[in-house]
Amino acid sequence: MLVKKFSDVEATKISSAVKTTIQVLISPEEAPHFAMRRFTMQPGGSMPLHTNTVEHEQLVLSGRGKVRLGDEVYEVEKDRVLYIPAGLPHSYETIGDEPFVFLCSVPNLEDKVEILG
């Protein structure tokens, strides 16, 4: 069993992103099937177009963002959920003056990330 606060988990900068950090809230070592991460993108923050070899399930906690999923672009805000299939090109960009924050769960499988362009 595991119980912790967001604030107890170290935030790490994502080197391929701008003004973006990740907190691994539940790691593969702590749960058998899924990992849970919290991403925080400051105003002006972004993550480049990329693919992953694992699917993503996401829940927006606060702020607004522009999310590219394949050829479509969506504006998302608090309480929106996203499903990103493995291999689908996707990117993120903060909209507005507040941080864009979302949870992302992924299966505990090997994940290869490929930055596109």
Image: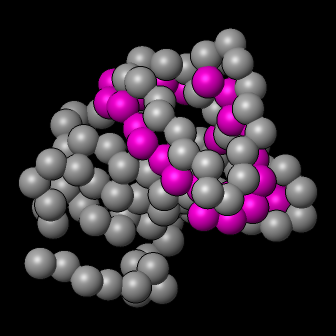
The spot of residue 101 in percent (x, y) is 63, 61
Which residue is most to the front?
79
Which region is colored magenta?
Answer: 41-69
In the rendered image of this protein, does residue 27 appear above or below residue 115? below
Instruction: Assign the C terminus to one quadrant of the image.
Output: top right
Residue at left offset 19%, top offset 79%:
2
- The rendered magenta stretch, by its main secondary structure, is classed as strand
**How many numbered dots are placed on residues in this image?**
0
**What's the residue at 45%, 79% (across, down)?**
6
Q: Is residue 61 above or below residue 56?
A: below
Give the camera-side residue of 1 and 7: 1
Q: On the image, which quarter does residue 69 sit in?
A: top right
Asked if residue 45 shows in the view, the reply is: no
Of the 4 image quadrants, the one containing the N terminus is bottom left
Q: Position of residue 116 (x, y in %)?
A: 59, 19
Give x and y (percent) for residue 90.
Answer: 59, 27
